Image: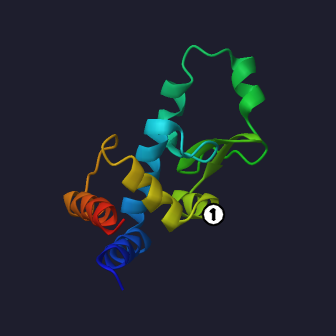
Amino acid sequence: MSKYEELYKNAIDKLQNDDDLFCVMVEELDSWDNFADGFRCYPMYELDDLHSGMKLSEFLERITRDFNLYEEYFYYSIYGLESTDDKVDLYKSNTDYEEVLDKVIEERDNIYFYDSGFEALVNEIAESKDTEQ
């Protein structure tokens, strides 16, 4: 196994074993280039702020029958405004670890890493990939 493959596997393991890290990386990518188009979750307490100034009729047109104000998160799907209590499951059902990691490596200079160890690993993967090519 090459150094690149070993580092890549370690990064995938981190994403698989740390749901917070996985979600933050999806959200950082979405903030940068709309990566999570249609499945980005927002805390329910931000619902009013994100829709302030909108007409009630416009807001109601966005809501699906599946929307529940008492769930923890909301998101915009192709069906309209929906809600969920499990953003990890939603993210995992709409992307995979390899896709997220590849995009994180590609956009590493444009996104924020709250986990400096993961950032160092991503940078090492990118450097190792460059030297192996």
Q: Label 1 sits on what residue type?
A: Ser
The image position of residue 4, as x and y in percent, is: 33, 73
Front residue of 15 and 46: 15
Residue 122's image quarter?
bottom left
* Viewer can see residue 24: no
In this rendering, is residue 102 above or below 43?
A: below
| Residue at the (33%, 49%) spot, across then down | 108
The image position of residue 120, as x and y in percent, is: 21, 60
Residue 53's image quarter?
top right
| Residue at the (37%, 65%) spot, across then down | 133
Specify the color scheme.
rainbow
Q: How many marks?
A: 1
- Residue that extends furthest to the bottom in the rendered view of this protein: 1
- Left or right of residue 49, residue 92 in this image: right
Front residue of 87 and 117: 117
In terms of secondary structure, where does tag 1 sit? helix
- Left or right of residue 11, residue 77 in this image: right
The image position of residue 73, as x and y in percent, is: 54, 47
- Left or right of residue 108, residue 116 in this image: left
Q: Quadrant of the N terminus?
A: bottom left
Name the residue tied to disc 1. 93
| Residue at the (57%, 24%) spot, across then down | 51
Front residue of 90 and 117: 117
The image position of residue 82, as x and y in percent, is: 68, 44
* Viewer can see residue 121: yes
| Residue at the (33%, 76%) spot, across then down | 10
